Image: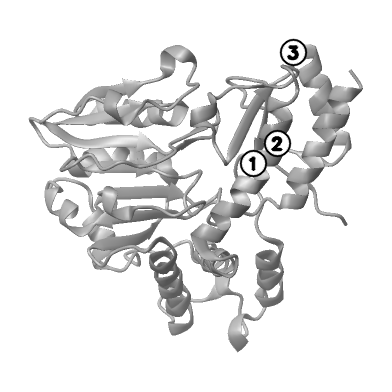
Amino acid sequence: MERAYNFNAGPTALPVDVLKKAQAELVNFQNTGMSVMELSHRSKEYEAVHNKAQSLLRELLQIPDNYEVLLLQGGASTQFTMIPMNFLSDGQQGNYVLTGSWSEKALKEGKLLGATTIGASSKESGYTFIPAPNDITINDNDAYLHITSNNTIYGTQWQEFPSFGDTNVIADMSSDILSRPLPVNNFSMIYAGAQKNLGPSGVTVVILRKDLMEKTPENVPTMLRYDTHAGKNSLYNTPPTFGIYMLANVLEWVKEQGGTSGIEARNIEKANMIYDVIDESNGFYKGHAEKNSRSLMNITFNLPSEELNQEFLAKAKEKGFVGLNGHRSVGGCRASTYNAVTPEACEALRQFMIEFKNQK
């Protein structure tokens, strides 16, 4: 069976080499006579997998020693709640930069637990751009500044991450973590659901500066405290063992591609294949994001009419392309070109887009 051209927004493509390795080890992991899914999470065999995933994350992202690397469950959506629970004290406010639907959801949870403010927003434009750092209002009583590094629905992405001084910057990087080098020191916390660039759904990576955990109030429930998981090496309760095993394998694959610098070059090449078609189509394909805010991970566009959008999507499906529908809230088309999406798939899409336009 041929592999599909998988442009799903998440869960999405995994590297074929990683899938084949998992296939080969599925029934008998390292001569244990068991699948990794059957191992005790207290066993030395699983512990090695667990520690390897954390170690590779530290290596690939150059995470300093004063940061914890946590492997949690509950997705980024649970982090929307845990962040204000742990860090938003009386007399302070959570500062949120709105750049899309997920930042709106993070703000909604923050409002349930304390005072919030909006430091900047591109909502009025239909989330077509990322606000400039100089346009973000920082306040003395901000407990943290929350940003979303990449916006899957609208196809926008922070192009760089400036320092905001002493402000605790917290970033949801669910859809672009590991896609490029990252200045971890500019952040107090980074979190990401795994199902875009890190592995299958079920694991959430949290990179957290250790001193931030000192701010957690005593009345925060045990399972919703970061210090609970940090104190037990993310083994306080049974972790998603198979997901973490797959995470470790994906991280090994990224290392083989030249690390985050190699992956970034590959992602730029892939995205440019599609953006060039959009830019050279004389308006037949119209990108949603402004050029200086374009995402390397999610390329959003429309054709001249909804009828043509639907015809394009139907014919693309016939050709073996999967996941090109835009999000139900905005419509149109979207090609998600995460790390594991191959250059060959992007080239095939480029050719299809050119052929479709030439037929009209």
Residue at horizontal 59 percent and vertical 22 percent from the top: 288
Residue at horizontal 31 percent and vertical 65 percent from the top: 236
Q: Secondary structure at mark 1?
A: helix
The front one of 345 and 152 is 345
Q: Label 1 sits on what residue type?
A: Ala
Label at residue 68: none
Q: Are dots 3 and 2 in contact, CB under 8 Å?
A: no
Provide residue 342's location: percent of width, then percent of height: 71, 53
Q: Are dots 2 and 1 in contact, CB under 8 Å?
A: yes
Q: Label 2 sits on what residue type?
A: Ile
* Distance Cα–Cα, label 1 vs label 3: 21 Å
Which residue in the structure is indicated by mark 3? 304
Q: Earlier in the sequence, mark 3 or mark 2?
A: 2
Residue 200 appears in the rendering: no
Image quadrant in which the N terminus is located: bottom right
Q: Quadrant of residue 256?
A: bottom right
Which residue in the structure is indicated by mark 1? 271
Q: Quadrant of residue 60?
A: bottom left
Residue at horizontal 78 percent and vertical 44 percent from the top: 347
Image-based side of 268 in relation to 344, left or right: left
Provide residue 127's location: percent of width, then percent of height: 47, 21
Asked if 123 appears above or below 299 in the picture, the reply is above
Provide residue 44's location: percent of width, then percent of height: 43, 83
Image quadrant in which the C terminus is located: top right
Q: Secondary structure at mark 2?
A: helix
Q: Secondary structure at mark 3?
A: loop
* Distance Cα–Cα, label 3 vs label 2: 17 Å
Q: Label 3 sits on what residue type?
A: Pro
Image-based side of 89 in relation to 270, left or right: left
Q: Are dots 1 and 3 in contact, CB under 8 Å?
A: no
Q: Earlier in the sequence, mark 1 or mark 3?
A: 1
Dot in front, 1 or 3: 1
